[in-house]
Amino acid sequence: MRVLYFHQHFSTPNGATGIRSYEMARRLVAEGHQVTMVCGSYGGGNTGLGGPFESGKRTGQVAGIDVIEFDLAYANSDGFLKRAISFLKFAVRSIGVALTHRYDLVFATTTPLTAGIPGIFARWLRRKPFVFEVRDLWPELPKAMGVIKNPAVLWAMSVLEWVSYRSAHRLIGLSPGIVEGIVSRGVDPAKVAMIPNGCDLDIFDAPVPPWRPAGVEAEHLMAVFTGTHGIANKLDAVLDAAARLKARGRDDIRLVLIGQGKLKPGLVARAKAEGLDNVVFHDPVNKERLAGLMASADLGLQVLANVRAFYFGTSPNKFFDYIASGLPVLNNYPGWLAEMITKEDCGFAVVPENPDAFADALERAASDRDELKAKGLRGRQLAMRSFDRKMLSGQFVRWLEGTPK
């Protein structure tokens, strides 16, 4: 089967972002399918291609995957208008590929929601099977966060969402809330599978030198956040907890924020202004360096804004990286991950917008390192039992192979 795979933010492990599409495409190739990945140039990613762009694109093969990369730069720090233009340009270029390329099935994954547009064209103009993967519910999430308020834009996104769902022969949701959101739009539940983000156990099992950023000593409890410093993450919650720890005289705990994003400069400025030297900022790192960081860390931070749509409607990469590396997780919002952490006893689930509760959990972690390691071990067992990427990628391939023609 020839699969045309659209993911604007595709990256190999050499990038500093999620590699779900890379691993899913590799599994398709390993099982005898041919995959063409169509992507843009994501600021935190690495497509594996080098050399100059010609006529706005470059092509090549990476790990057995045929890659078409458009010269469309994108970064999380871009403003809304710039990002919207990038999304639309990618959709337009992708339509051209969908209408001319030779393939048997088209697969598209968000974000952004516009990723589904070439699939819509493939379904109705070329009568090709179309599978659509939903990583976030749009426009529900941006509306809930207040990022998009224009009624016309929200209406257009809602129409695009409806058309994408109804055009797809099959769909994939990455969390219980996403699956529920798809079904609530009138989609037959039998057409929707939940395949969450997974744990790359091989990456975190590989022998790598452990390391800590400057300012973090061996005796410090090191709690790490790895991801985008954006509106959705609301990392002021980490700084609020750091301020409480400073006031309590707890100089044995360091909060390390690894990544980039639109709000990072403001967070750095706030930490400096308030003298929060227990917060350490670091640039993004690739998966190998991330594995070394995790090997030296004590706790992973799963932090999001207190937005109800996040509770069951997200499947964050970082959570699965934490448990894959055997780190216990501190989660600061309700939902399916908080419930899992509590049930499996693999970390701490604290109430949102409560810096004292956040700081209390960090102090508990620092005071009983043996129990902390036991929590991490239980998280690792959960990763192997339920979220091994190899197992989930097998489910992914079977779901695509069974798509009605």
Image (cartoon, grey):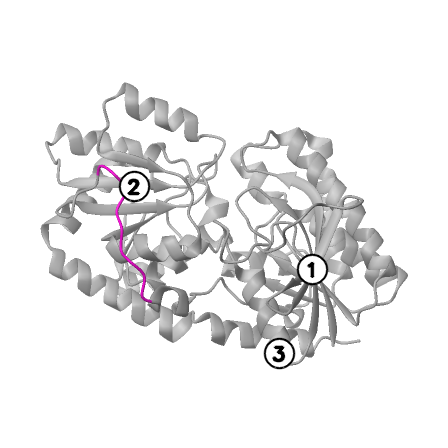
Q: Left or right of 129: which side holds 387?
A: left
**Which residue appears at 63% of the width and 45% of the height?**
41
* The stretch drawn in magenta includes residue 169: no
- Using a 10 Å C-alpha cutoff, classify the residue at mark 3 as few (fewer than 14 neighbours), some (14 to 19) or many (20 or more): few
Check disc 3 and report its element: helix, strand or loop.
helix
Q: Left or right of 246: which side holds 262?
A: right
Q: Note whether 395 is above or below 206 in the view shown.
A: below
Q: Left or right of 109: which side holds 301?
A: left
User: Can residue 401 be spotted in the picture?
Assistant: yes
Mark drawn on residue 309: none
Check disc 2 and report its element: helix, strand or loop.
strand
What span is in magenta? Answer: 207-215
- Using a 10 Å C-alpha cutoff, classify the residue at mark 1 as few (fewer than 14 neighbours), some (14 to 19) or many (20 or more): some
* The stretch drawn in magenta includes residue 212: yes
Pointer 3 residue: 398
Pointer 2 residue: 256
Q: Quadrant of residue 192?
A: bottom right
Q: Nearer the viewer, mark 1 or mark 2?
A: 1
- Using a 10 Å C-alpha cutoff, classify the residue at mark 2 as few (fewer than 14 neighbours), some (14 to 19) or many (20 or more): many
Decide which of 330, 46 is in the foreground and name it: 46
Q: CA distance from mark 1 to mark 3?
A: 27 Å
Q: Note whether 258 is above or below 34 in the view shown.
A: above
Which quadrant would the C terminus be assigned to in this image?
bottom right
Q: Nearer the viewer, mark 1 or mark 3?
A: 1
Pointer 1 residue: 60
What amino acid is at disc 3? Arg
**Which residue appears at 83% of the width and 61% of the height?**
122
The percent coordinates of residue 227 (x first, y second) are: 43, 45
How many marks do you count on the picture? 3
